[in-house]
Each structure stands twice: as C-alpha cells, then as structure tokens.
Image (cartoon, helix red, strand yellow):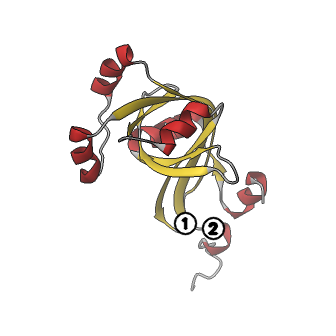
Amino acid sequence: MTIDELEAYGTERMDDDGIDQLLANQTTGVLALPAEGAPSMRPLSFHFDGDSALHFVYVVGEESRKSELSDGADTARFLVYRTETPFNWRSVLLSGAIDRVPEDESEAVGDAMETTRPDLFERALAVENTELYRFDVEERTGVKHLGLPPELEDSGDDAVE
C-alpha cells in the first residue's frame, strides 16, 4: 500500500518541520547498509546536527563489519521512528551518503554530540577504538498517524438525545 492509499486510514505525510522535530527529539534509529544478500541493519544512537546530517560513533574494536560496510557504501538508509500507541506514531526514512569523519574534524563534531548511549557503549568507549561517521541526508520522507483511524473516531451520530 502506498502512503497516498494509507491517507484514507488517517496516515499523513510529515512536513520538513515535523521531520526535523522527530530527528531532534529521538536519539536512536536503524542504519541499513548494502551487503551481499540482504542489507545489514544495525540499531544506532545518533546526533542530528539540526540541518542535514547525522553523526554516529562506532565502537570498532579490532575489526568492524559496520565500518567495513559503511566505508564501501555509496548510499545508506536510516530509519527513525517513535511509537506512543498503535494509533500514534511517527516514522522518518533518510537516504544519503555515509563517510568516516576525518580525525582533524572529529573533536569538534564529538564535542557537539550529546547523544544518550546505553551504559555498555559508554564503558566500551573508554577502552575501545571508536570511529566517527557522518550521514549526509540527501532524501527524506516522513509519515505519521496521530489519533484514531477515521472509522473509530466518534462521529457524534450515536449520541443519546
């Protein structure tokens, strides 16, 4: 079903302000990278720069499949979503280029990041190798559903007189 078809059920396209608001208020999403067979999908914390880029910190250790796939990707996708109830949710799908941030720029970007990370990653960051990546957003779409579907909304026709 297309988004246009889902509009009959109360789904709406998000405007740029709505997309920016979701990106500014969420801290996690799912990164999809091209891989042989099926895409490689990874949950990640992110920082939105307020304009057109996201930043990710990878804990890489000795090896990192995520870094390897990111370095080889021409295009990646990132999904950010928020679900309050089955009838209240928002979803933003981003497409763009992902690149490692050069070391001379890492510190400035890292200082700007205020991403909430699980404790496991905070502890790993203190002792493991990390890499900073930038996801430049080239395309973005957002959809939302806020409220009950039209067929469940109170039409007022059943009111007792």
Identify the residue at horizontal 43%, vertical 47% (top origin). Answer: 44
Question: Toward which corner of the image does residue 9 lie, by quadrant?
Answer: bottom right
Task: Tell me where residue 40 appears, x and y as whole percent.
Answer: 58, 50
Amino acid carrying label 2: it is: Pro
Residue that badge 2 annotates: 149
Front-most of residues 68 and 134: 68
Compared to residue 157, the image places residue 95 above or below, namely above
Identify the residue at horizontal 37%, vertical 40% (top origin). Answer: 62
Q: Earlier in the sequence, mark 1 or mark 2?
A: 1
Amino acid carrying label 1: it is: Phe
Q: Contact (CB < 8 A) between labels 1 and 2?
A: yes
Compared to residue 103, the image places residue 160 above or below, namely below
Label 2: few (<14), some or many (≥20) within 10 Å? some
Quadrant containing the N terminus in the rendered view? bottom right
Front-most of residues 97 and 81: 97
Q: Is residue 121 left or right of residue 102?
A: left
Task: Tell me where residue 38 appears, x and y as whole percent.
Answer: 67, 54
Q: Which mark is residue 26?
A: none
Label 1: few (<14), some or many (≥20) within 10 Å? some
Identify the residue at horizontal 57%, vertical 34% (top origin). Answer: 16
Q: Is residue 80 left or right of residue 113?
A: right
